[in-house]
Amino acid sequence: MLILRRTDIPPSEITPATVYGDRRRFLGAALAAGGALLLPHAAQAALPRRFDQLARSPLSTTEPLNSYKDITTYNNFYELGTGKDDPARNAGSLKTQPWSVTIDGAVEKPGTYTLEDLLKPHALEERIYRLRCVEAWSMVIPWVGFPLGDLIKRFNPTSRAKYVAFTTLHDPEQMPGQRRAVLDWPYVEGLRMDEAMHPLAILAVGLYGEVLPGQNGAPLRLVVPWKYGFKSIKSIVRISLTEQMPPTAWNKSAPQEYGFYANVNPAVDHPRWSQKRERRLGELRKRETLPFNGYADQVAQLYSGMDLTRWY
Ligand SMILES: Nc1nc2c(c(=O)[nH]1)N[C@H]1C(S)=C(S)[C@@H](COP(=O)(O)O)O[C@H]1N2
Ligand SMILES: [Mo]
């Protein structure tokens, strides 16, 4: 079973990781027994289906994890439909291999790279983060990824690089949601350079120790845990370093509701609802939303002197 390529496995046969701990123990036992757990390097498989021996980053939260089922069946990914259960149902049409990513703009070494080449120099680790959606629900997700800043540094940004712009795949054949003008496709997002270089900002390629499912933004997505979920753009095909603040999909769609910064901020209501509380998926009682989603100690200084009611 472990030697199957991901494309050989129908989604119905992928074990939900509700017994994550158990499976980890199983893998550990198999390794101790001399089992060959590392996947042979299949020509078409950019990533193994499962990541082994991941170190857990100390930047991880110790809160209880949401279930694999919650994380992979309650999604926002409008390219795959606007209902929370649409992305999981429609993810099958998204072809994540081969996959390439273009790095361009204000860098000394622009180019288009296969996902494999792009990832090769980076050690993957587990990062358990809270994700707080602007719609006032939240989850705790064990991502597999690496710091975005490490990738950016490799391409030698020039002094003109002030922002980082990200673009999602645009292909209505693969992304049925793009056949309707729900948003101005492709989905785009951006970060200020210092935000992008912050150690909490990661690029994720997996969750629960497995390769990302399509609905969660396979094969490569951004995760910026102190910002509302919509900043964490999925299925990235382009990363551009820019001098000007780049346009962002939700800001273009509803600028009075969604700003460029989108830092989680219980003190600034969304025009149509409060941001003071949130519902952690799987819990009944609402929780208080924390400034910067609980990451204020690490990131608040990025915004010192800024009026966060204006720069929402
Ligand atoms: N390309 C793209 N990226 C996207 C979205 C989207 O619709 N399209 N939705 C965003 C929103 S609103 C949220 S809350 C998170 C959800 O990530 P998850 O489904 O992996 O939990 O993805 C973000 N990234
Ligand atoms: Mo969201």
Image: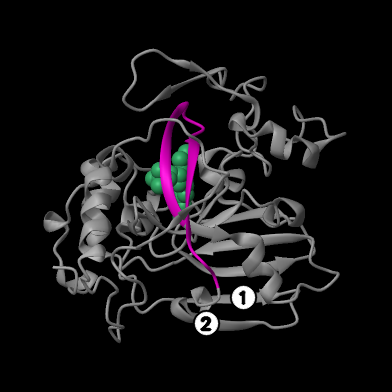
Q: State left or right for residue 242 relative to residue 126.
A: right
The quadrant of the picture occupied by the N terminus is bottom left
- Please say if 25 is above or below 271: below
Q: Indicate whether 201 appears above or below 308.
A: below
Residue type pointed to by label 2 = Tyr
Identify the coloring. Answer: one colour
The answer to whether marks 1 and 2 mark residues whose Cβ atoms lie closer than 8 Å is yes
Q: Residue at x 48, y 17 (%)?
A: 287
Query: What span is in magenta?
Result: 122-144
Q: Between residue 63 and residue 183, name the one nearer to us.
A: 63
Quarter of the image with the C terminus in it: top right
Mark 1 sits on what residue? 103
Camera-side residue of 26 and 310: 26
- Residue 48 place in picture, x, y as percent: 32, 70
Q: Which residue is mark 2?
A: 113
Residue furthest top as drawn? 285
In the image, residue 84 lies at what x, y percent?
A: 31, 39
Q: State the residue at coordinates (65%, 66%).
A: 150
What element does badge 2 sit on?
A: strand
